[in-house]
Image (tube, rainbow, N blue to C red):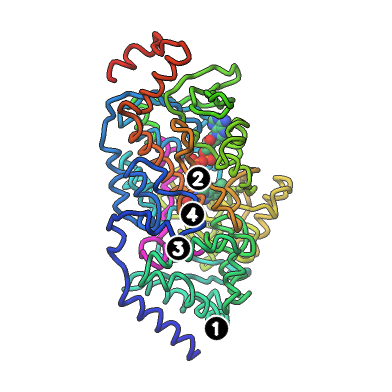
Amino acid sequence: MVRLSIAALLLSTTAAFHLPSTRHTVVRPLTSSLASTTTTTANADEFTSESAKRQIGNDSFLNQDLMARAQNGPGVKNQERLKIGIVGAGLAGMVAAMDLADAGHDVEMFELRPFVGGKVSSWKDKDGNHIEMGLHVFFGCYYNLFGIMKRTGSFDTELRMKEHVHTFVNDGGSLGSLDFRFPIGAPVSGLQAFAKTEQLGLEDKFHNALRLGTSPIVRALFDFDGGMDMVRELDDISFTEWFTQLGGSRGSLDRMWDPIAYALGFVDCDHISARCMLTIFMLFAIRTEASVLRMLEGSPQTCLHDPIIKYLEDRGVKINTSTGCREIVYDTDESGKPTRVTGIKVGPKEELKEYDAVVCALDVPGIKKVLPQAFRDHYPMFDNIYNLDTVPIATVQVRFDGWVTEMNDDARMMDVSGDQSDGRGGGIDNLLYSADAEFSCFADLAVTSPGEYYKEGEGSLIQAVFDERAFDRSNDQIVQDCIDQLHALFPSSRKLKCTWSSVVKLGQSLYREKPGQDKFRPKQATPISNFFLAGSYTYQDYLDSMEGATRSGLMVADEIIARADGDKGLKAQSKAAAVASGATGETEEAKVPFFATA
Ligand SMILES: Cc1cc2nc3c(=O)[nH]c(=O)nc-3n(C[C@H](O)[C@H](O)[C@H](O)COP(=O)(O)OP(=O)(O)OC[C@H]3O[C@@H](n4cnc5c(N)ncnc54)[C@H](O)[C@@H]3O)c2cc1C
């Protein structure tokens, strides 16, 4: 106990003196901090764009200034108007399209599914129920994504901020929490949250403090670059290996860290990279707002994507849904080495579309399918992608005739009368974690995101994400398991009836954030100068997340904008290649107005 107090005192004293509140608004050359980092695959030298370079390395990690950049757009119009094809209309692709359209380019998007949004998509079933690919929460440090939402006008109206508490629900209805509400911000608010939490017993708290007290996070409080570099170096071991090396206990892993690991990557602490987990703790330790959660007002389609689609359509971007890319078309040199992408073949008829630049903003299975063998044969960075694996998940929605998470008042739990829209339903209005259920995290959407999820006369709409432990079960079985496990967590809910359910299985969702993956994640600029990769699996610090996807899209757009103009620009390369191949490069479609603004 005495040693715990000393450890806590040490942490809070260090924090009080060294809290780097404005540290990351300084922009300085990034290569120095990267030079000492062996595991980082993205290198600022590979980007021409200064703006893209600002997204790389330690300085970018918590740089709030990036929000203004994302909000204001690229702020330049290129002289040359490029014809750009974007494959994949998830967040990464749509964000890249926004900036490229703003810079004056002619952008066309191709999406395999009938709707945009990728892993954050939602759609309506035949009865008008909004179904989601997965439960999505926003950390308060999603600066780039918040900037995009401000640009499209959805930030102020479509996000609901939650209490600054992370709640764990245990069998029998006991709650534990990490309560960050405290008059002093990070890291003190975090330290007191860990010290007070009911989720861990005294012994586990002691071991937790011991391990976190010797973590790179403490170093980062007075030497941010040093701490971040240490975190990056820990990609090759699991969180469990790292945590138990110096005092961390199995009890903390089981009761607190496993639910968090599942929520982050749908794998447990034994299988998630230490780098992934420590990256998130770093966010929480340095920025008070990072651990504040936000959820959408309603469905992702309405609250996130519709405003982006409007922004794109207002700028002439054509989005072709249900039109997958079948093939990438490219030029080679005499040895067969791909030198330049000339277009893509799309749709069932494999229609050829020619472009000055192509962005593949895909998920891991998508990019693996579409990359030509010659790209893999000649460039290791493309071949490395095939080392990345994915995790299967099943998202379950279960509607009840009362309020499942309302455990204190039976009458309130059963009361679905009147208008309980706008989050006025009973129970807990936040994301929930559990160590005792097979779903890693869950929420009552009728309360947390009531927009389209609350239905008059009905109660909770619990949305829970099951991981691979349950993936192979039948949908009916998964729904039954979800109900049984909810009953175990919230015993009072046994009095409620399930009125509707849905299961969405995604066989290949996030890239598997297991140890040793960072070295396989590709950078966004590739060795083929007019071919780019975006997507949350590409290398950026925000793991496989909406913020990571957004960052990658902005980086690609910045890089294309930086490369567009001039004698050696992408347009000049297209014209030169067309001349070399004997084509005029000036098709009827291309002459007017395509070259008119060039
Ligand atoms: C269940 C679940 C819960 C999650 N929860 C959170 C959360 O709470 N917070 C958070 O920040 N992140 C969360 N994520 C992660 C987040 O959803 C992703 O990181 C992010 O949406 C990835 O965006 P993206 O654009 O990179 O890729 P995707 O969204 O995967 O987009 C890629 C697109 O490419 C399309 N495509 C594939 N092949 C082709 C082809 N040949 N031609 C054309 N199109 C093609 C796909 O259909 C898809 O639309 C969650 C993910 C899942 C699965």
- In the displayed structure, would residue 509 be above or below residue 588? below
Foreground residue among 552 and 294: 552
Q: Where is residue 313 in the image (x, y as percent from the top left)?
A: 37, 27
- In the displayed structure, would residue 581 be above or below residue 277? above
Foreground residue among 12 and 396: 12
Q: Which numbered marker is on residue 40?
A: 4
Q: How far apart are marks 2 and 3 (CA)?
A: 19 Å
Give the amino acid type for the residue marked by disc 3 in the picture.
Asp
Q: How far apart are marks 1 and 3 (CA)?
A: 32 Å
Asked if the beta carbon under badge 2 is closer than 8 A to the nearest atom of ligand 1, the reply is yes
Q: Which numbered marker is on residue 229?
A: 3
Q: Position of residue 231 (x, y in %)?
A: 48, 64
Q: Nearer the viewer, mark 4 or mark 2?
A: 4
Name the outermost residue toward the top. 588
Helix or strand or loop: what does disc 4 sit on? loop
Give the amino acid type for the residue marked by disc 4 in the picture.
Thr
Residue indicated by mark 2: 538
Q: Distance between the residues labelled 1 and 4?
A: 38 Å
Give the amino acid type for the residue marked by disc 1 in the picture.
Leu
Name the outermost residue toward the bottom. 2
Asked if the beta carbon under badge 3 is closer than 8 A to the nearest atom of ligand 1, the reply is no
Range shown magenta: 278-307
